[in-house]
Image (spheres, rainbow, N blue to C red):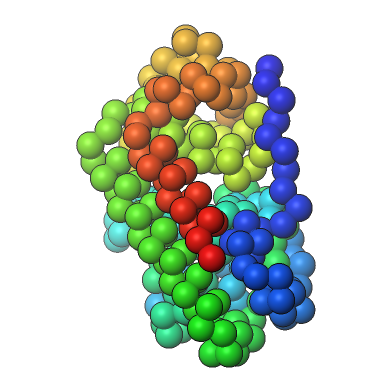
Amino acid sequence: MPLALKAPISNQLLDSLPVKMRTEIYKMCESVELTFGTILCEPEQPIKYAYFPITGFISLVAIVENHQPLEVGLIGNEGMLGVTLALGMPQAPMRALVQGSGTALRISAGHLRQALQSSPLLAKKFNMYVYLLLVQMANMTACIHFHGIESRLARWLLMTQDRTYANRLHLTQSFLADMLGVRRSGVTVAAGALQNRNLIHYSRGEITILDRKGLEVVACRCYQIMQVEYQQLFNTK
C-alpha cells in the first residue's frame, strides 16, 4: 500500500497571500471542527461565515426538486467556502455540506468584507479563486454528462484523496451514487472494474486506494485540467 499523502497544517489559498496580509486574516479567524454531514449554508440564505478548510473538505451541492442532491464542486485546503462575498454577494449560491471531517479556519462575513475593502490585492486573489471554482464546476458538470462512470469515479477518488490525505475512504454506494449522479448499480460496476485492475480495494463501504498513479491514468482529463488551474492560482502573486 502506498504511503498516505502528507497532511497539511494550513490552507493553500491563505498561504499564497503575502505574509502581512495572511497574518491579518489569521487574526480575524477562529479554528473550528468540520463534522461530517453538517450543512454550512443553504441556497439564497445569508452567508454568516467563510471557511478555509485545513484537513476537512466540503461539497458544493445542487438541489433539484424531486431528485437526489448532486455534487458540482469540492473545496478542501486548496480553497475556501464563501468566496462569493468577494463579489459583493451576501447569499449562498448553493448548499455546502461537510463531506470530510477535519478542521478549518472560520471568519465572519463582516470581518471578511472589512478585509476585502481594505485590500484590493486580497480581492484580486479571491476573484481568481472564484474563476477556479467556475472552471471546476464547469468541468464536473461536463464530466457527469460526457464521461464514463469508471473514469469519473477515478477522478472523484483522486480529488477526495487530495483533500483527505488518506488512502482509506469510507464511502457507501448510496453516497457515491449521489456524488456522481448515477445509480448504485453503476457505482458497483465501476468500483468492481477499478478493483479488478488492482487500483483500489472496495468492501462494505470502505475504499482503499492501492495505486494512485494507475487511477490518474484511468481518470478523465478533467482531473489534470484542475491540477494545472490550482498551480496557476497559487503561483500568481
Q: Which of 130 and 74 is in front in this view?
A: 130
- 124 vs 58, left or right, is left
Tell me which corner region of the image, top left, top right, bottom left or bottom right, holds residue 212.
top right
Q: Nearer the viewer, residue 174 or 81?
A: 81
Where residue 47 appears, as percent x and y from the top left, is: 52, 79
Q: Residue at x 72, y 57 (%)?
A: 10
In the image, residue 139 sits, relative to residue 146, either above or below, namely below
Q: Could you tell me if residue 111 is visible in this image?
A: yes
The residue lying at 76 percent from left, 67 percent from top is 31
Q: Residue at x 30, y 40 (%)?
A: 143
Query: Is any atom of residue 175 visible in this view?
Result: no
Q: Where is residue 99 in the image (x, y as percent from the top left)?
A: 57, 50
Kindly indicate the quadrant of the structure image that contains residue 211: top right
Name the image quarter holding the N terminus: top right
* Above-or-below relation of 142 to 109: above
Residue situated in front as seen by the camera: 195 or 126: 126
